[in-house]
């Protein structure tokens, strides 16, 4: 009887052991110069008919030029030319937030430093109350500085009267904040944003399409602080998303701390606050230059997900509950894949596999 019980227990031990092994294997799976592709989609629970429907929808209902879906470290869906390099619009801001992490932690950047202490001013001057804004206020777009930025594409038209807002009290999507944040990082590190991307992200993540020579800033003269525009491929954007999913770890090296990753993707401005102030954009809350999903329909598996987002259809989206990264690009500046269309794409992605009854994620 004892021998029989031992024999009967072996399958259970093997099953438990395999689950533990799977858990460890996918969290330690990273791409080299090439991503690994999932060769057994059906065996992993993906519905091929629903993936085909996703592909049709992307082709017929969006202006997608590049898209990748990474699950458990493997590519399960791909569309378009993923190595074509193009403009990523406001996703640049989320990239900058990543770059800040190590310098906040080593003390080169003090988030509580004010613009006055850093001796920042601008064309025709900043107001005394505006100079009280901190670096943290800039990174969370709550500075109360409503000076014109070097580039359009924000909510300045909805801003209160200059000087009427105490820094830190009101959220407004504000390019002045983002551009000044880029200038501050460069001033305190004595390196350009593009040099920092090159050394901190492109090389460790083995970005094969990154080209520092094509990156350039621009401004219209309204402000001293130009916009630090960026050009990435879909593949390289996926690596950024995967780094954030893995909480700053890449192949065993902690490139950016877990604490900083968690901080920047956690809402500082909630969806409800932005909605109440009639300044909500795209159903999201806002952290440190990352958009965080905290809308009323924030249910599993969408709870806790976050995204970088840029004009015309640029997205780097992470759903940590189901170990999923979705990256979407549109290389045209005359067409757009709007947020509502992208959310439909995401729903088709998450419905192509029965995550809820998988038994592994919940």
Image (cartoon, rainbow, N blue to C red):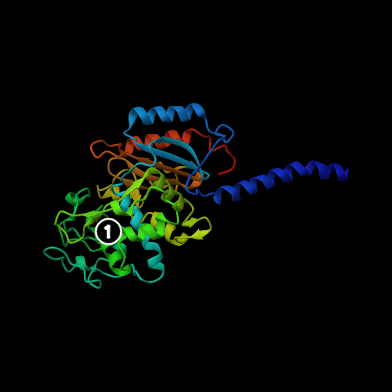
Image location (x, y in percent) of residue 330: 31, 39
100 up-or-down from 324: above or below: below
Image location (x, y in percent) of residue 316: 38, 46
Residue 112 appears anywhere in the view? no
**Could you say which quadrant of the image residue 15 lies in?**
top right
Name the outermost residue toward the left: 124
Q: Nearer the viewer, residue 258 or 146?
A: 258
Number of marks drawn: 1
- What residue sits 28% from the left and 49% below the top? 276
**Could you say which quadrant of the image residue 119 lies in?**
bottom left
Residue 43 appears anywhere in the view? yes
- What residue sits 52% from the left and 30% below the top? 47
Q: Secondary structure at mark 1?
A: loop
- What residue sits 39% from the left and 57% below the top? 264
- What residue sits 18% from the left and 58% below the top? 146
Q: Nearer the viewer, residue 298 or 30?
A: 30
Name the outermost residue toward the bottom: 117
Q: Quadrant of the C terminus?
A: top right
343 up-or-down from 102: above or below: above
Q: Quadrant of the N terminus?
A: top right
Question: For this view, does 302 lie left or right of residue 310?
Answer: right
Crowding near the residue tagged with mark 1, few <14, some 14–19, many ≥20 C-alpha atoms within 10 Å:
many
Image location (x, y in percent) of residue 92: 31, 52
**Could you say which quadrant of the image residue 260 lies in?**
bottom left
Residue under circle 1?
A: 142
Q: Nearer the viewer, residue 311 or 141?
A: 311
């Amino acid at each position: 009887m004892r021998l029989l019980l031992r024999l009967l227990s072996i399958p259970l031990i093997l099953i438990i052991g395999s689950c533990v092994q799977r858990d460890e294997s996918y969290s330690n799976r990273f791409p080299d110069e090439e991503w690994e592709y999932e060769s057994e989609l059906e065996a992993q629970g993906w519905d091929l008919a629903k993936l085909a429907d996703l592909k049709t929808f992307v082709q017929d209902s969006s202006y997608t030029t590049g898209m990748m879906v990474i699950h458990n470290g493997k590519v399960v869906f791909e569309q378009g030319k993923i190595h074509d390099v193009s403009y990523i619009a406001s996703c640049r801001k989320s990239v900058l937030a990543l770059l800040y992490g190590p310098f906040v932690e080593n003390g080169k950047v003090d988030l509580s430093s004010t613009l006055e202490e850093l001796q920042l001013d601008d064309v025709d001057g900043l107001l005394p109350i505006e100079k009280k804004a901190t670096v943290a206020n800039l990174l969370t777009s709550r500075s109360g500085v409503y000076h014109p930025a070097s580039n359009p594409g924000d909510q300045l038209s909805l801003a209160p009267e200059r000087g009427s807002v105490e820094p830190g009290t009101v959220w407004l999507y504000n390019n002045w904040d983002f551009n000044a944040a880029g200038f501050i990082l460069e001033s305190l590190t004595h390196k350009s944003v593009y040099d920092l991307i090159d050394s901190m992200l492109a090389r460790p993540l083995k970005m094969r399409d990154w080209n520092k020579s094509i990156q350039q800033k621009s401004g219209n003269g309204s402000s001293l602080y130009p916009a630090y525009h960026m050009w990435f491929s879909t593949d390289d954007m996926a690596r950024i998303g995967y780094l954030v999913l893995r909480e700053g770890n890449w192949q065993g090296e902690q490139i950016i701390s877990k604490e900083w990753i968690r901080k920047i993707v956690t809402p500082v401005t909630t969806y409800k606050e932005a909605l109440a102030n009639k300044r909500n954009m795209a159903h999201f809350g806002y952290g440190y230059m990352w958009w965080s999903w905290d809308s009323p329909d924030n249910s599993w598996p969408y709870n806790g997900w976050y995204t970088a987002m840029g004009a015309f259809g640029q997205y780097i989206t992470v759903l940590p509950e189901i170990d999923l990264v979705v990256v979407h690009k549109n290389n045209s500046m005359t067409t757009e894949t709007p947020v509502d269309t992208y959310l439909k794409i995401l729903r088709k992605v998450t419905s192509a596999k029965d995550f809820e009854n998988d038994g592994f994620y919940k």
